[in-house]
Image (spheres, rainbow, N blue to C red):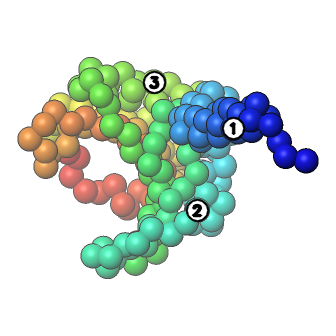
């Protein structure tokens, strides 16, 4: 039996709609995590720090030119976070870090920082303390730590120093205190 032109056209239209719908769902951004989901993931990241974030490592990223470290893509674990990675340094220190660019500049970066600080505070118990400092770029960095703890959490809003544009970024850092002895941008 030879299909009619109408049947072929219907099949073509149905297939096209299915393909278009599938493509849209693949290209749509992942839904933002709720604060409760973020707390579950953040506490899992903190617990997994002693295991070099094995649970959160995905595919290894080429670290050509960066001889002192290995980099893995990592699972997103924080609202609005993008580009999450696990960095393992040759010294044995590791950190989980997410970076996302703020479209509007300093005001939006600081608002994102403040929201991140609020989320982190909701996730941590009373043993964690925080301290904030102003960065050289006019941004802000808030550190969370525990007495005698090896893990530190940092939310940082800063202007990129190597850009002629007003590029502001926000970062979430979970890792070793020793890695944060670098100068604050």
Q: Is residue 154 above or below residue 178?
A: above
Q: Position of residue 122 (x, y in %)?
A: 59, 27
Crowding around mark 1 (Cα neighbors within 10 Å: few <14, some 14 to 19, many 20+) is few
Please give the name of the residue rendered at 37% of the width and 72% of the height, measured from the top-left corner. Answer: 63
Whether tag 1 and tag 3 are in contact, CB under 8 A, the answer is no
What residue sits right under mark 3 in the picture?
115
Q: Position of residue 131 (x, y in %)?
A: 37, 35
Compared across the picture, whether 172 is left or right of 2 comes to left
* CA distance for labels 2 and 1: 38 Å
Q: Is residue 171 above or below residue 113?
A: below
Crowding around mark 2 (Cα neighbors within 10 Å: few <14, some 14 to 19, many 20+) is some
Q: Secondary structure at mark 3?
A: helix
Q: Secondary structure at mark 2?
A: strand
Q: Earlier in the sequence, mark 3 or mark 2?
A: 2
What residue sits right under mark 1 in the picture?
12
Q: Secondary structure at mark 1?
A: helix
Q: Position of residue 116 (x, y in %)?
A: 46, 30
């Amino acid at each position: 039996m030879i299909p009619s032109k109408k049947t072929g056209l219907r099949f073509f239209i149905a297939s096209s709609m299915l393909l278009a719908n599938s493509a849209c769902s693949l290209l749509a951004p992942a839904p933002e995590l709720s604060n409760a989901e973020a707390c579950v993931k953040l506490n899992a990241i903190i617990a997994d720090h002693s295991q070099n974030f094995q649970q959160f490592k995905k595919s290894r990223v080429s670290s050509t030119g960066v001889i002192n470290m290995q980099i893995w893509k990592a699972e997103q674990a924080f609202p609005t976070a993008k580009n999450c990675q696990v960095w393992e340094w040759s010294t044995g220190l590791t950190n989980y870090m997410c970076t996302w660019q703020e479209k509007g500049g300093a005001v939006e970066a600081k608002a994102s920082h403040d929201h991140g600080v609020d989320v982190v505070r909701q996730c941590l118990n009373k043993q964690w303390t925080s301290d904030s400092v102003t960065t050289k770029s006019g941004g802000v960095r808030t550190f969370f730590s525990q007495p005698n703890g090896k893990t530190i959490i940092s939310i940082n809003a800063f202007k990129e120093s190597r850009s002629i544009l007003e590029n502001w970024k926000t970062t979430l850092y979970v890792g070793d205190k020793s890695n944060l002895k670098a100068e604050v941008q």
